[in-house]
Amino acid sequence: MKWWNKILQATCMLSFRRNLFSLKEKSEKYQHFPFKQKRFFQNDNSEAQHRHSLSQRIKAANGFTKVFIRWPLLSVGTILFFLAFSACQSPSDSKTVIKFWALGAEGEHVQKLLPEFQRRHPEIEVKVQGIPWTAAHEKLLTAYAGNSLPDMGQLGNTWIPEFNLLNALENLEGWIDSSAVIAPENYFPGIWETNVIDSSAFGIPWYVDTRLLFYRKDILQQAGYDHAPRTWEEWFDVSKKIKRLSSGGEKYAILLPTNEWTPFVITGSQAGSSLLKDGDRYGDFSGAQFTAAFEFLMKFYRDKLAPTGITQVTNIYQGIAEGFFAMYITGPWNIGEFRQRLPAELQDQWMTAPMPGPDANTPGVSLAGGSSLVLFRKSPKKAQAWKLIEYLSQAQQQFEFYKITGDLPAVREAWQDTSFTNNIYIKAFYEQLEHVVPTPKIPEWEQIAMKVQQYAEAASLQQMPAPEALAALDREVDLILEKRRWMLEQK
C-alpha cells in the first residue's frame, strides 16, 4: 500500500473515533433527561403532549437550549463524517458483485472452485444461490416475470429454448468470438448443438450426460457373446439367447421401463426420425422411421424379453445382481451406484457399452444431456459474469468439478486425464458422447416426452396396437403445438 494511503486511512480512523466519542457523550447526556422531556425531544404526538402550553414547553426546554441547538448540528456532523468515512474506504471494498444461480448439488459444490477464481479476479465477488431442481423452473420463471433474474445461471439444456423464447438469454456469439477459452470445437458436437438456436449459441455446456448400455458380461458370455451388442440385430439375438438361459423361468434379457420415454426416443433418433416435422409444428411419431424403431422395441415386450409394467422390478440393482435382467439403458450416475450396490463377486462381471445401432454402418446415437451456463440478457454485469463462465470452462476446472461431483466434463480436453483414460466404465461414455443428438429444441418438448411415455406404455401392455398408439400420440402432440403454430404464423 502507498504511504499516503496509510496516512489517509489513519486520518479516517482518527476522525471516526472522535465522532464516535462525541456521539456517545451526547447520547449519555440525553439519557439523563426526565421522561417527559425525552418525549418532547422524541417528538411524541400523544394527546398528553399536546396539552402542554407554549410556556410549559419553553419551561421544559429550559436548561437544555444548548443541547437542543447542538443536536441537529451533531446530526449534520455525523452525516458528513459517514460520507467522509465512506470515501476513505479501501478500493478492495468496492468489488463488482455478480449473482449466480446454480441448481441442485452443483449449487453447493461449485463454491469449492471459487476461491481460485476470486484470487485471479479480486475485483469480482461471486454470490452463489443454490436452488433445488424441483423448484428451479418455477423460480426462474417467477424471477423473469419480476425482472429479478441473476447475472448468470445454470440451465438444463432442454430449458434453453424456453428461456430464449422469452428473450431472457444473452446471445453469446460475440462473447465466444472474442474468447481465448471457449470455442465450439472444444466440445462434443451434439452437446454444443443443444445450446444453438437459429445458428446462435445461448448457452455454454458445463457438464454432460447421456444414456448407454450397462450389462452383465458373464450372462452375455453364457449366451455366446463376448462383447456387447453392436447392432439391433445382435441386440435382439442376444436377448433371445439370454431368455433361453432361464429355462422358462421369470427372467428377462433387458429392462426397458414403461415409465420412461428415453429408450423410445433414442431408438427413434437412431432410425433417423426427427420426431417432429414442418419446422417442429407437428408430430412425426407415426412416420415410417419412428414407427420402425417403436415396433422394434415392442418385440421385446411381446416376446417377454423385457418385463412390462413398473411393478415387476422394484430394485434395479438387486434385479441385475440376481440376473432378473442382464441389460439396462442408463446414465453415468449409475457407475458409482453399481460399484456401491452390486456384491463384491459381481464387480468384475458388469460393463458399459455404447448404444447398438440399426446396422453395422450406423453408430447408435443417444441423447445429449447435461447443463449449460447462461448469461441473462438484462444483467448489467455480463463482462464479469462471462469471466466466471470462461473460468468454469477451463479444462482444469472441468476436471476438478468432476472430482467433486462426478459430473462428466463438457470440454473434451479434460477427458485426457488418466482418471478417464484408465476408467473402463467411463470410456464408453466418451465414445457415446461423440454420437449424441439433441431432443427437439422447443419449449413444449417436456410435455411431448411425457406423451411418448404414456403411449409407449399403452402399446407395451398391448392396450393399443402400435400404429394406433402412434397415431393417437401425433394427435396429442399436434394439440400441444397449436400455440407454437399460431405464434410462428404471426411472424
Image: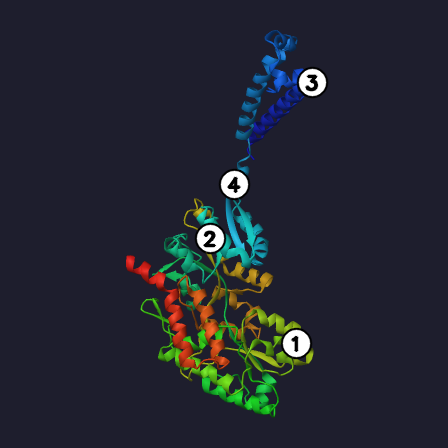
In front: 414, or 78? 78
Give how far apart the Cα atoms at labels 1 and 2 are.
41 Å
Give how far apart the Cα atoms at labels 4 and 2 are.
29 Å
Between disc 4 and disc 2, whose residue precedes? 4
Which one is closest to the eye, mark 4 or mark 2?
A: 2
Q: How is the image coloured?
A: rainbow
Task: Identify the amino acid type marked 4.
Answer: Lys
Vertical order, 194 against 15 (above or below): below
Vertical order, 37 against 82 (above or below): above
Give how far apart the Cα atoms at labels 4 and 1 are.
50 Å
Mark 2 crowd level (few <14, some 14–19, many ≥20, 10 Å Cα): some
Give how far apart the Cα atoms at labels 3 and 4 are.
46 Å
- The reply to whether callout 1 and callout 3 are in contact (CB within 8 Å) is no
Between disc 1 and disc 3, whose residue precedes? 3
Looking at the rendered structure, which numbered label has been put on residue 141? 2
Task: Identify the amino acid type marked 3.
Answer: Phe
Vertical order, 453 against 360 (above or below): above
Q: From this viewpoint, is residue 387 visible? A: no
Give how far apart the Cα atoms at labels 3 and 2 are.
54 Å
Task: Identify the amino acid type marked 2.
Answer: Leu
Q: Which residue is mark 1?
A: 342
Mark 1 crowd level (few <14, some 14–19, many ≥20, 10 Å Cα): some
In the rendered image, residue 130, in percent from the top left (x then y), is placed at: 56, 53
In the rendered image, residue 51, in percent from the top left (x then y), is placed at: 62, 13
- The reply to whether callout 3 and callout 4 are in contact (CB within 8 Å) is no
Q: Which residue is mark 4?
A: 95
Between disc 3 and disc 2, whose residue precedes? 3
User: The C terminus is located in which quarter?
Assistant: bottom left
Looking at the rendered structure, which numbered label has been put on residue 35? 3
- Horizontally, residue 103 falls left or right of residue 232, namely right
Give how far apart the Cα atoms at labels 1 and 3 are.
77 Å
